[in-house]
Each structure stands twice: as C-alpha cells, then as structure tokens.
Image: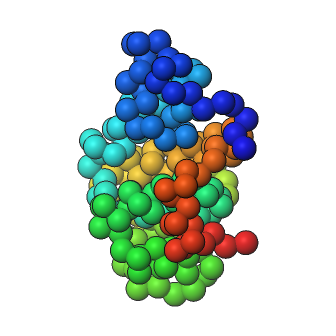
C-alpha cells in the first residue's frame, strides 16, 4: 500500500490538473508536489520524445533497470511501453537471461547497454570496459542520453520503492508474463 494517498484531478488546483493527464499511480502520488512533478515530467518527456538515442535501446536499458532493481512498477509499465518501441518478447527474455549471466543473441552494443544499466544499478560508476563498448556504437550525444536514461530510472525506482507505489491492475499481467526473479 502506498505511503501517500493517491490524488485525483479534483484534489489538485486547476492549474495542476494537467499533471494527471496520465492517471497512473506514480503521478497520483508525485502530484503532492506539483512543481517537482512538472520538472520530473519535463525530463521524462525529453527522454521519451526528444532524445536521439534509439528508442528500442532506451527501453531495453529501462527494462534492465526495472528488472535488476526488482521494481515491479517500473518493470511492468515499461514492458508495455517497450513493446510500442520495438522491444520483442524475445528481447525481454534476453534481458532476463543477460541478467542471469546467460548468453543472448544481442548485438555487442545491446549487450553493452544492458551491462551499463546493470553496473549503474549496482554502483554509481561505469567501468572503462563498458564505456568503451558503448562508445563503439554511440556518439557522444547518445552516450550522454543513455547514461541520463539509466540514471533517471535508477532514481525513479528508488522513489517508487520509498513511496511503495502500487502496480495498477492493468499492468499486473506483464508481471505474470515476465516474472521478476528472486
């Protein structure tokens, strides 16, 4: 159960009701701080709609963060989103396999992106080896965007966990399809 009550549009001042255009529990809890939510959404919008990073790679990195942190909320929401950006069910199974140290059919860049996400979940640094691998496939702008995506979602999963945000019923089916490991 969430630590903060979920707000509805009717709970917000008229100038902040747009913050719940997507009526999901994450935003319903965050809107207790409307200005922070607006700033948060600004970066999220950049990541989703303006970054030049390949959206499939972005979503694979986000799924890796969600899976590695065992964040049911982030993982379930991004399974749905990732499919819209070309991530296949085999890719999702591959992310699970890569996390478990198993071989995958991913390209060297995809492997490096997933490894970067796992490393940044575990510690704030990125190894020279992993940086070198991602720099073989991404220019400097896309490297910054990738590391921003990973860092942003590492923060998001911590907020979700600290506030104990509940997974909405519509998203629970994704956790049944692709369960989080123990």
- In the foreground, 129 or 113: 113
Q: Where is residue 95? Give x, y as percent.
A: 50, 74
Q: Is residue 10 above or below residue 148?
A: above
Q: Is residue 33 left or right of residue 59?
A: right
Asked if 8 appears above or below 155 in the picture, the reply is: above
Task: Quadrant for residue 29, please give it.
Answer: top right
Above-or-below relation of 147 to 174: above
Expressed as whole percent of the image width and height from the top left, the position of residue 170 reads 49, 56
> At which x and y percent is residue 82?
38, 61
Q: Position of residue 160 (x, y in %)?
A: 63, 43
Q: Residue, x 50% and y 51% (percent of image)?
A: 150
Work out which quarter of the rendered image holds the N terminus and state it: top right
From the viewer's side, name the closer residue of 77 and 52: 77
Please, which colouring scheme is shown?
rainbow
Relative height, residue 106 to residue 78 (above, below):
below
Residue sitting at 55 percent across and 81 percent down?
A: 97
The one nearer the camera, 23 or 136, is 23
Q: Residue at x 41, y 60 (%)?
A: 80
Residue 85 occupies quadrant: bottom left
Tell whether 105 sits left or right of 126: left
Question: In this rendering, does residue 139 appear at all?
Answer: yes
In the image: residue 96, left or right of residue 4: left
The structure residue drawn at horizontal position 37% and vertical position 24%, both measured from the top left corner, is 18
Q: Is residue 39 visible?
A: no
Q: Quadrant of the C terminus?
A: bottom right
Number of marks in the image? 0
């Amino acid at each position: 159960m969430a630590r903060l009550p979920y707000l509805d549009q009717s709970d917000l001042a008229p100038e902040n009701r747009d913050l719940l255009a997507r009526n999901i529990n994450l935003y319903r809890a965050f809107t207790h701080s409307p200005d922070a939510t607006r700033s948060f959404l600004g970066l999220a919008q950049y990541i989703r709609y303006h970054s030049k990073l390949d959206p499939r790679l972005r979503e694979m990195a986000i799924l890796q963060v969600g899976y590695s942190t065992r964040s049911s909320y982030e993982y379930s929401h991004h399974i749905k989103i990732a499919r819209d950006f070309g991530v296949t069910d085999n890719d999702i199974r591959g992310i699970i396999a890569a996390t478990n140290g198993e071989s995958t059919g991913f390209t060297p860049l995809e492997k490096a992106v997933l490894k970067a996400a796992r490393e940044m979940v575990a510690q704030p640094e990125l190894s020279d080896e992993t940086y070198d691998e991602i720099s073989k496939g991404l220019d400097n702008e896309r490297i910054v965007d990738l590391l921003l995506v990973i860092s942003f979602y590492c923060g998001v999963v911590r907020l979700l966990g600290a506030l104990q945000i509940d997974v909405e019923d519509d998203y629970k089916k994704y956790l049944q399809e692709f369960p989080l490991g123990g």
